[in-house]
Image: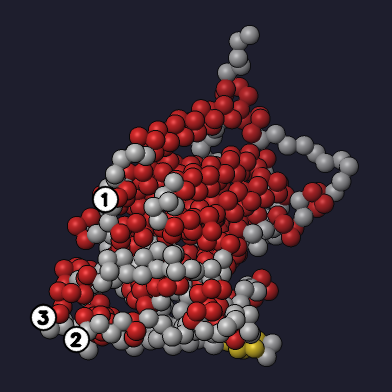
Amino acid sequence: MARMAREKWYDIVRDLDWTLSYVDYEAVFPEWMCGHGKIPREAWAKWDEPYKVTYPEYVATQREKETGAYSVKSVLQKSKVFDQLDEGWKSVAKVHFGAVSLIEDLAVYAELRMARFGLSPAWRNVALFGALDETRHAQISLFFPHELIGKDPQYDWAHKAYQTNDWAIIAARATFDGMMINPNVVDVAIQLPFTFETGFTNVQFVALSADALESGDINFANMISSIQTDEARHSQQGGPTLEILVEHDPKRAQWIIDKTFWVSARLFSVLTGPGMDYYTPLEMRKQSYKEFMEEWIAEQFLDQIQDYGLKKPWYWDEFLAGLDTWHHSLHLGVWYWRPTVWWKPQGGVSPEERDWLNEKYPDWEKNFGWIWDVIIENVNSGRMEPTFPETLPWLCNLCHLPIGTAAAPNNDKYPVRSYPLKHNGYTYHFCSRPCRQIWWEDRDTMHDPTVIERLLAGEIQPPTVEGILAWMGLTPDVMGDDAHNYSWAKPYASQPTQSVA
């Protein structure tokens, strides 16, 4: 029997809806889950995704992607490629696997919520494909590092990380729950597919894949590329949803995008920034983190939202200033608190690397060089005890990152300080004005205590560094240490330090 031509049936099938007769519309699409707000029901008839696909086409395409990814993996399985990778680069992969693998699984539930409660049948159709995408992403992101556990138990954190109370995971969990699980589906579509996937992960995955190839990690590059092609398709749910929201409630649209961009940028500054500017071998770096963020994230993000008639976020100048400081502060903190992470932070401040940092960030020496000089002197003198923590830093009640990492020690406009807020008799502390403002607006859904609050409440016993590490799930075989055994400090033993106090 001859098949009907695709163009004769596709639009009918993808937009198939029905008139409810046994239940009220509100019972099927409740406000608290759907978030239609000021948008009239009939407005959703305009929802139209630019990239259309049928199920047979989807399956054929995904089969080709799976075949390509796993074929390369199979070929490389018996090679010595992994053993030749730089330890700093391996840390980039470990950070990614631990922070992202199970978030792909969380995204399945976000997509399924849109597939059930999306306010257009076309939207629900696309979201169903999105759920299949995210299922594949979770599977491949867990399978690829699994074979490496025998060589390095830190790779086990691809599966284990989100089952622990590690501080970085608490920060990531708070961000992603607020993006995928807490909001209604209209907000989810603006936060996840539009702001986060289109604005951050799509371009970040492209850059990460390129860096992986430069570093010789063909397996990782192939896996990331396979995932990114799916992200580019299902992330299109955000655009049509935003277009309708802007038409009927532009103030809400602006707020959702503004807050999501800020919390995403804060999280990226610890998960991506150090990897690009410190962990990746110097000869393999193509761009600094700041250059990457300015060109591929900030510029494209502004172009996107302005196309929809929205304004740049109110904190934009502070965000741009943070590109000079955030990830440097967080890298310094992660390295100092290295036993609290599941990867090996690379110091990344050898004389050559320091020259590169000063070229890319003219104020790096003034802000951070003098701190590293103290560390270098202690390392070269064999005084390792002062290079390890005795307690934990105070953390922001929104982003859960250390107070001070959103500012610069030598910056009069954005100085290092806490931004407190008293509410219901309790004082909350924030790393920045945007974090404080976002928390205040969304305070009814903000119930994640920081690690410090848990420590003071007696949840962590004993209240010592050892007790904290055990509570975070970090055992001696997986807790982090310097990636290159402090070799970057040795050249300074025979020359004066460079810093300008």
Q: Amino acid at mark 3?
A: Gln
Residue linked to disc 2:
500
Real-space CA distance between mark 2 and mark 3, rounded to the nearest whole angstrom? 15 Å
Question: Crowding near pointer 1: few (<14 within 10 Å), some, many (20+)?
Answer: few
Residue 478 at x, y percent in the picture: 44, 64
Tell me which numbered mark, 2 or 3, is placed earlier along the sequence: 3
Nearest the viewer among 11 and 406 is 406
The residue positioned 70% from the left and 46% from the top of the image is 116
Looking at the rendered image, the disc whose residue lies closer to the viewer, 1 or 3, is 1
Picture quadrant where residue 472 is located: bottom right
Image coords of residue 457 (percent x, y): 63, 85
**Amino acid at dot 2:** Val
Q: Which residue is located at x 19 percent, y 57 percent?
A: 283
Q: Which residue is mark 1?
A: 84
C-alpha distance separating marks 1 and 3: 31 Å
- Tell me if 268 is positioned left or right of 494 in this view: right
Look at label 1 and name its amino acid.
Gln
| Residue 483 visible, this angle | yes
